[in-house]
Structure formats: C-alpha cells, structure tokens
Image (tube, coloured by chain):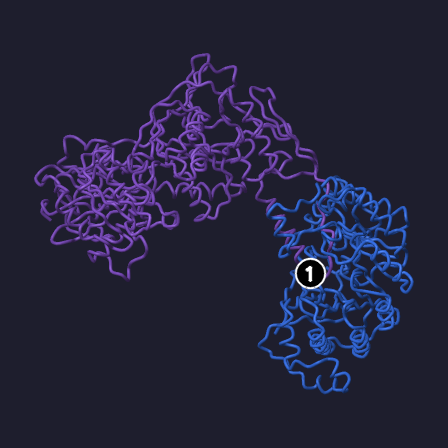
Amino acid sequence: MPDLSFKQANALYIHFPFCSSKCPYCDFYSVKYSKKRVDLYWFALFMELEELSQKVDNNLLQTIYFGGGTPSLVPTFYIKEMIKLIRKRFRVTPTAEITAEVNPASINEEKIVALKRAGINRLSVGIQSFNDHHLSFLGRESSGEKNKKILNLVNNYFNNYSADLIFALPNQTLNELKKDLETLLSFKPPHISLYNLEIHENTPFYKRYNRGELKLPAEELDAEMYEFALEQLTAADYQHYEISNFAQRAYRARHNYIYWLFEPYLALGPGAAAFDGSCRSENIADLNHYLKYYNPEKLSFKEIIENNQLLDSVKKFNPNPEIKIRNLNCLSKKEQMAEYSFLALRTSAGIFYHQFYRKFDLEFKLVYKDEIKELKSSKLIKEGNERIYLTEKGKELANEVFLKFLLD
Amino acid sequence: MQTEKIRNFCIIAHIDHGKSTLADRMLEYTGTITDRKMQEQVLDKMDLERERGITIKAQAVTIEHQGFELNLIDTPGHVDFAYEVSRSLAACEGALLVIDAAQGVEAQTMANIYLALEHDLEIIPVINKIDLPSANPQRVKEQLLDIGIDPDEAILASAKEGTNIDQILEAIIERVPAPHNGENKALRALVFDTLYDSYQGVIAYVRVMEGSVKKGDKILLMSNQKSYEVDEVGFFSPAMQKKDELSSGEVGYIISGIKDVRNCRVGDTITLKNNPAKKALPGYQKVQPMVFSGLYPTDNADYEVLKEALEKLQLNDASFTFEPETSEALGFGFRCGFLGLLHMEVIQERLEREYDLDLVITAPSVEYQIIKKNGEQLRIENPAAFPEQSEIDKIKEPFVTAEIHLPEEYVGQAMELCQDNRGEFKDMQYIDQDRVTLKYEMPLSEIITDFFNQLKSKTRGYATLDYELEGYKESKLVKLDILVNKEVVDALSTIVHDENSYQQGNALVRRLKEVIPRHMFKVPIQAAVGGKIIARVNIPAMRKNVLQKCYGGDVSRKRKLLEKQKEGKKRMKQVGSVEIPQEAFMTVLERDENA
C-alpha cells in the first residue's frame, strides 16, 4: 500500500469523530458519541500512532491538535494517556502548543481543569454566536448565557485559547454581529477565528439551500460584516494574521500556521488528512472501517492500560494489508506551487520570494510575472520587501487572486 | 420478384405511438431479424435517435412473408423533415397508420394522414398499445370515423406484446395494392433517402418505379444531369445485401461512386444515361432551411475543427447548410441553416458529442426579407447584419399555419398564448367531444422561440403542434440590440415586433443579469432600439469571494474547486472586458412567463 514518506513533520492532528448532536452546517466526519465506542476507538488510535511512529524516525513535534467532532466529550483519562504516549514515541518540544477543541454545550469547570491537567495548554472554544436565535439555527446546544459563562471559566484557567464566531447567517443584521463581537471582545480572548457561514455538500444545510429554504445574505452585507469585524478587531489590537484568524501578540495558532506554510504534518483518525511535503493523504472517513483495520479484536483501551498490556498488544498488532485505510494524492510540481501560493497568501506575510525559491528552485517573480502585474493593477495584492501579500480588497476577493496562481 | 408479389408500405404515426416497436415486432415475427441480432428498435441506427426515441433518417427493410416481398420504409417522425416524409411516402403504395390506443388521434397523426391521402396510399389503421390499462380502442375508432377512415378496417394490436402482428401482415398483403408493373419501360427510380459512407460514397435508397438497374449500368440523376457508373445494387435485410438487379416495384439501394450527397438529393429521379426517361418523377424539391443559428467555437483555436465537423455532417445531410460568418463578439464562426429546431438540436448535440466541441450557439432566427428605402432588397438571417433602422422601408418575415391539437379545457390558454405570439386565429374544429384542433397563422420567428415549450406547459403536456410554411408577410419589426458594459454585443441582437420591444428588452436584460456573473467592476446591461436605450440593469461589482476556512483537509478540495472555476472561465466568451457564459447567447430564446 503506497504511503507518505515523512522526513520531518512538526505537527500532529488527532481526530475525535464523536458528537452529541450533528450541527447542520458541519462537514467534518463524526458519529454519535458512545462511551463504549470511544474506548474501542482510542485503542485504534494508539495502534495508528504506533504505526506512524515507526514511519517517522526521531520526529520533533511542535504542535498537537485534538480536533473533531467534539474532543471535549472525551474523558480526560484518554487525553492524558494519548499525550503521554506521544511524548514517548516522538520528541515533543517543551513549548509545544497542545490544543483541544471544546464545545461550550458539553463542558464545565471540572472538565476545563481536567483538560489542563491532562496536558492541554490551549483551548479552541466553539462559541459561534451569543445570540440564542442564531445558536439554535446553527444547531448549537448552548445558549448565549452559557457561552459567556464558559468563556469566563476558560479565561480563568487558560492563558492561551481561541474562540470561533460565525457571521453572515441568514437574516442576520450588522447590528447582531456588532453585539456578538462586542460580547466576545469583552473577554479579550487571545485568539479569535471569524468565519462566514459556508454551505458544504453532504450537510443538511446544503439540502435546504438547494431547495431554496436557506438564503444567505447578499455579498454586500457579507463584505460589510467582514469589514466591520476587521475594523473592530484591529482597533482592539488584534493582528489580522490570516484571512479568518486574529491574534494578540504571541498568540497565533501555531498548528494551523503549519498548514498555511505548506509544511508537512501528521494525522490520526478516520477522515484525518496528512501531508508529507509533496503528497497528501486522507484516512477513509468511516469509523467502522477504521476500527476494523486498527482494532479488529475490539480491545478496550481502558482495560489494556489498566492491565498494562499496551506493549503486548502493540507487538500483536498485525493489520490486514487487504484493507485500504487511506487515499493518497501526490501533487505535481505545478499543483504544489499553486497550493503553496494560495496558502501563503492567506497569511498577512504573504509569499516570500526566497522561500518559494528554496522550495521550488524557481523565481516566483518570473513564473508569475504577468499575474503579479495584473493583480497589482487591480489592487488586489501589494508588493513588499521581496514578497507579495493581499490588500484588504484582496482578502475579500481572495478566490479571484488564488485562481491566478493555478498553472495550466 | 414479380410485381404482383411486392408490397411497399410505410408506417406513419405521431411520436411515441409505437411505430418503431411495431416495425421491430414485424421483423422479429417474420424472422427477418433473429433474436440475437435484435437491439431494441433495430431500425433506429443513430445513437441520438435511439436516445431521443425518434427516427431521423429513413430506413428500409425487405421482409419475406408467405411468398411475398414486403418492403417497409421507416419514415422520419418529425415536422422538421416533412419533405423527407413525403418522398418516403411517394415510394409506397400503402401506409400503416399507427395510433396509440390511449392517446388517440394527435396532431401528427392528422398531418401524416393528409400526406398519405395526398399520395393516394392505402391506409391500414392499426390501433396500438391495446395492452395499456388506459387503452380505449373504441374511442379511437370513433375518431377514425370522424376523419373519414372506416373503423372496421382497424386492427387492434400490441407491438410490445406481439399481439395480432400476423393480422397486420396479412392486411398488408391483402389490402395494399401491388406496385404497378413498369418492367419494360425506361428506368425511373425515386431516391427517398441517402447515406454517406466514407468508402463507398453516397448510397442512394431507391424505389424503382419503372425499368431496372444493375451493376455496370450508367445512371443519370435527372435534377442535375450528372451521371455515374453503378458499382452495386441490393436490398436491405435490414443490412445491405447485394443483388444482381433491382426492378420495377422493388425497394433497395444503388452505390455508384457519388462523392457528394448534394449531387444525389432526396426526391431526385435516377434513370439510365443511355435510355433516359422522358420525365422525372414528380415532387422533387430542393429543401430549404427555415431556421438559422450562429455556431461559434468557444475557443477560437477550434475554428478549423468546427469547420471540418460541419463538412462531415453535411456529407450525410443535404438539408443542412452553413456559411462562414464573423461576429464582433464571438469571432469567426458559421451561420447554419436547419429545417427546424429539432434538426438544429440534433446537429448541435452531434457536434458537441462526436467532435468534442465546445460551442457558443446563438439564438435561432429566421430569414427576413428587407426592402430598403433606396429600393434595395435584402435577405438576411443574422439579426446583427440588419441595416440601420432609418434605411429600412419594409420588413417581411415568414409566416406559418400552426395546427394545435389539444384537450378542450386548455383551449383558452392556448389561444391566449397564440395571440401573445402574434398569432391570428384561423379555425377551430372538434376532433371528438374532448379534443380540439386550433389553427393559427403565426410568424415563424415566434414559433421557434420557446413557443412549443410554453404550449406544452400551459396544456400540461397534452398539446401537439404541427406547422407549415405559408409565405412572407410584412410586419412592424425592429432590431433589439443588447449592450454589455456599454458595447453592443452583436451576437445578442434579435428582431422583435415594435410593440413588444420594450417588454422584451426588459425581460432580456433581466435574464442576462442572472446569467452573466459578477465582475471586478460594475457591468451595465442595456437594451436599445435604433440607438435609443429602452431598458437597463446593472450587475454589481464582486464584493466578496473567499473561502474563509482553509485547514489541512480543505486544501486539495479548495485547489480542485479553484481549478473548476478556472475551467469554467475558459468556457466563457470574452467580449471586451466582460466574460459571457455560452448560455447567455441562447437567453434571447427564452420567454418570460409574463412577457
């Protein structure tokens, strides 16, 4: 079975595909939470981790990210053990950023503390809104009040955390966004992610959208909201370091940054995506399939740990080579250049000519000579010191810019 | 075969009444085609025909049954090809009139009956699909009585189930007259269809009226006086089968090295060079295209490919015409002439499918006769080529008589629709107690712009339409121009009636707004007549187009989306600084429900 070949990968993503309920806009893979299945799943994860550590020798991790799904549903015992094992199998820098996504609906003070004790040093809180009406539309099981309470608690225990906000909801007014933003800023979270509502295929919103039951606000309002948010956040001293991400000094999301730098990263779990610098892989997004491959004996992680059988089970682990566990997609040089370019342009730093040269052995200014000229004249990009980056207008019309970097 | 033992017949029917299934069943029953070789509806060779369930080219098959030679000529089933139908009928002595037992007599049934009567054919009514639960053969018999056909002659059958096929065959033998015996006369063979083969050249499908023809004979085509030597003659089984000689009364093919299908036209008479007939067979007509459209390659580099493709298509289709044309907006292309909308659609699909061409097709138009103030007379098919309004004295356009069959309850709406499309009421008759025939005189240009679809939708699909060219009449017409970003886009110009110009101008600009995407700048769309702006909308500039979430797993998907967007842009036509999608050029075809 073909596979990625990692020389060095500084980031590790771990998927937790369980939720208590599915939000109608989400297209990340998840199933209904069940304690028993989590237990089986965790064993499977460990096997994949073992497998992975054999492939990547002596790797140094700078970030670990528990995403989902709803990672905050996992009993912290599991998170603790996972971090322990990761540290055993990989070198982890002492200042590593270890993030867990949490859903305010299913978290409390106890859990927040427990997560911290388990080794998590950054939380990503899925607030989305403080408006009860919008929260209900989005299928979030929390309320505006609860969201505020949770943020308070998180604030007390974590120095480093992020909050998500979604805007451009159907029938949302600029005023409503203003309120949401004000409320969020009152907590002074070190990091904020701001997204407009996107309708993805294979989600309940997609079906409703196609039937004409869901109407997104006009481009003009979407843009107004975005511009307003940018103004407010910049005024509150947040650096707009990526199209949708804002951080106070020293609080940028390091894990995500690795994506935008087009650097390799590792991944575990069904539906999780990894990258080795030139090829991308995606684990098949099916829990049963994943369990069949990584935990065919249906072993309980808890029991294995409690009976100290981890080493034995690792030795016994013999995956069925007939089962395909992931899809591989290797990028041509042109495709790599395209991805590198549009990912880098998402960041405020933009594309550095010397970095492009180091990666591709080509002069960026020559390869994209015409495109740079065109984009500059339409005021979508600016040229800085040996780099180009998006203007404010360019950020809003980023897709038009990105198109230019696709080579035939 | 002696002429007394020959029967030449065709099958005529309204679309979907079961003509092809019946033909298949007859072939099966008589062992002409073995089960193994049966492909649903054998006679419809072209993929497109099979897909759409229609017959485009006539096909012929010789069936042997009880010592008789029954020649079945399958006729094109659409009003666009009326001339071909008439020539196929001229090759026969009888016609099976197939009527769907559930649907009853419909527009094309009537049209074909008239044609069959005109050609003096013995009509054998077959009431088909009696297997259907909704079948009502009694009602159909009553309809037959109403139109002067003896209902007792009708054979009840089910082609699908093979019921009473033997009765039909017997009826053909008993009732269809044998062809007249022209054995010792000079050769006159009617060409009722042609097929182009890259090796053999044009294959003429013929019915020998008088005389005989064999290999080695020098034949003469009477319409153009060109002569050729016969390489082969034969019949259809339905595959081509060589024969020594084709003689009076028989149906078959002649191959004689004719390279150009325009030299061997449907309806022409083939005779012998050394013993030519005195007069050609009657009814020959050079077919005229009625509907014209601009065909342009989306990518200018494909021009030669399109040209070659059109040349190849024309090899097999003498009624399809094309001429090079230039459009400011679209570049170099061709103005193509078709017999009708269906003909146009078929050609379009073949070009896109068989030649893998990406095409911009402008809305179909008719040919106008223009009389300028200085007396000059012009015939123009391309609206963009119209002279200035101020120079025009009169404009004449082609008119047709449209015959609509529909259930009585929809008559009001259908009449309204006809009136909205500049139709003039001519006649209304009851076919039976539920169904009516409406006759309206209408401009052909109204028929070809979405009229049929509107008719169908207003009558829940029950109406059928047939039309015939009447001639040219004067109308108050003007050229409606469309300006995109302040520039006239010649390919979007249409000819409209003066009274409708405001309405249609508005409808058109509004539709274009929906179809043309936002650009980085505001794009005004205007409609104008004689330089005066009569409608305007604005396409606002793009404000936001960004994927806000882009993390690990999103990247490849994002790149693929962008690649798709880029591909999409390529397929648009760049007109000035505006990108116009292909569909926009056809937008002029659609009608607003309210317009």
Instruction: Tally the marks.
Output: 1
Q: Position of residue B108 (x, y in %)?
A: 31, 37
Left or right side of A391 for B578:
left
Q: Position of residue B538 (x, y in %)?
A: 66, 31
Q: Position of residue B377 (x, y in %)?
A: 41, 18
* Secondary structure at numbered mark 1: loop
State whether residue B400 is above or below residue B313. above
- Tell me, yes or no, if residue B508 can be seen here: yes
Picture quarter containing residue A338?
Answer: bottom right
Q: Quadrant of the N terminus of chain A?
A: bottom right
* Figure chain in blue: A
Residue located 59% across and 26% down the image: B527
Q: Position of residue B545 (x, y in %)?
A: 71, 45
- Tell me, yes or no, if residue A401 can be seen here: no
The chain letter under disc 1 is A
Relative depth, front residue between B200 and B512: B512
State whether residue A286 is above or below residue B6. below
- Residue at far left of view: B184
Left or right side of B579 for B255:
left
Tag 1 residue: A22
Picture quarter containing residue B404?
Answer: top left
Disc 1 residue type? Lys
Count residues near mark 1 (Cα–Cα under 10 Å), then give few for <14, some for 14-19, many for 20+: many
- Residue at far top of view: B374
Relative depth, front residue between B282 and A405: B282
Relative depth, front residue between B252 and B479: B479
Relative depth, front residue between B5 and A58: B5
* Figure chain in purple: B
